[in-house]
Image (tube, helix red, strand yellow):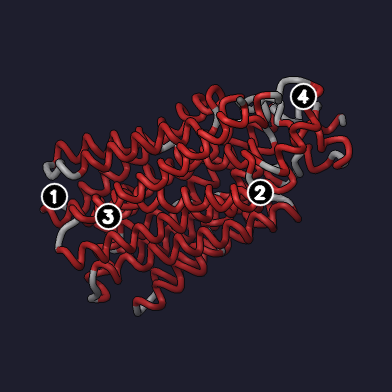
Amino acid sequence: MPTTTTPDSGIESRYAWVRLMVSLLLMTIGGSGMYAVTVVLPQVQLDFGVSRSDASLPYTLTMIGFGVGGILMGRLADRFGVMVPVIVGTVGLGAGFIAAGSATSLWQFNLAQGLLMGLLGTSATFAPLVADTSLWFTRRRGIALAICMSGNYAAGAVWPPVVQYFIDGAGWRLTYIGVGVFCLLTMLPLALVLRRRPPTVAVPAATTAPAATSSPVAPAADGVVHATAQAPAAAPVQTTGSDRPLGFSPGTLQLLLCVAGVACCVAMSMPQVHIVAYCSDLGFGAARGAQMLSLMLGFGIVSRLVSGWISDHIGGLRTLLLGSVLQGLALLMFLFSDGMASLYLVSILFGLFQGGIVPSYALIVREHFTPKEAGARVGTVLMATLLGMALGGWMSGAIFDWTGSYRAAFVNGIAWNLLNVGIVVWLLVRARRLRA
């Protein structure tokens, strides 16, 4: 038991917060593989002479690799600790940028993006770090997860204007190679900070099972599991709740969360992936689009931090519903915004509205599943959100090719968002009935 209570090294300790900051940096740097490709989309289309949907394919393959790799890296972290997948991801990301910058054809660029940067690279700096962070915090788990996952949006705020700046000066190929070298030089030293295993892993399972399953500080709003979480005698109830979360089998609940994750992120991907191309089509230029993307994701950081605080008070499911409804409203506003000022404003609102959605899924998993499954369960659900980003990124490009505008693509995003909202409302209704 001492490993879980030591002030300097245990749960909620100073080391836990230092570790969180390192995870934030790693996710910010690692997110370059996800966002750089959205900035170079117009240049890739021009360089290789392909259609908009074909130029969107590298992003789609990156996100598919990102999602599938999240499961693989999550399992690797469960077995060997998070440092191992982070080192693998660092090498994959650096090699991917260099290979993509040297590509002579679109299929080579696709391979570098999907396999090296997605499957083996960026994936290691997302789901494994999120799952690892959830094991180092209990009372402040919601805000800790929000801070960690803010790295994903910090990457979106930092990398688009940086990449665009160097593209304007040196071209996209040299920019890609330079980013790859930067990732190798900065991420490997940071990975060494994560050598220590989480305290919950070091303690024997027999002594940790009741406490770990009970999640004693999880919000009571999301289901029967949490309604009794504060009572010491509730451990047997918590174990039963883990076997039947929200009255489902674990696999069924995870499947529902995965479907919701795909739906919300198909909607989310439309502005994030195509705002640069959209601005270019409207005549505002790629640099303006990169600025809008940076603002969108910069305000997404604010959204994630605020949503993390909110989720500690109302629970993951209600926070997910709030973010999903607001995201739908922002997408609707895009339909009526084709001026520069209005696009800047709506981009900011979109970032503020949807930043807390994906972290809510990680929190929901930790509220309803056992800690020993954290890496794999979180990785699977986050994989679904990334597959949604992949599908939505390609689908929006395809709809543009079919219709000649992005208007139908925004409508498509709104429809998918409604599916996500419907699933979350259903889960909340079941939670309320179980509490009753």
Q: Looking at numbered disc 1 in the image, what kind of residue is underneath it? A: Phe
Which mark is first along the chain, 1 or 3?
Answer: 3
Camera-side residue: 248 or 42? 248
Q: In the rendered image, is residue 415 in sight?
A: yes
Counting from the top left corner in percent of width and height, residue 247 is at: 64, 41
* Residue at the image point whose x is 34% and y is 79% from the top: 105
Tell me what residue is drawn at x 26 percent, y 66 percent: 398
Residue at the spot of label 1: 284
C-alpha gap between disc 1 and disc 4: 54 Å
Label 3 Cα crowd, 10 Å radius (few <14 / some 14-19 / many 20+): many
**Disc 4: which residue:** 7
In the picture of the structure, the residue carrying the numbered disc 2 is: 250
Q: In terms of sequence position, does the residue under pointer 2 or pointer 1 come before the other?
A: 2
- Front residue of 95/375: it is 375
327 on left or right of 435: left
Residue at the far top in the pictured view: 231
Q: Which quadrant would the C terminus be assigned to in this image? A: top right
The CA span between labels 4 and 2 is 34 Å
User: In the picture, residue 119 is in which quadrant?
Assistant: bottom right
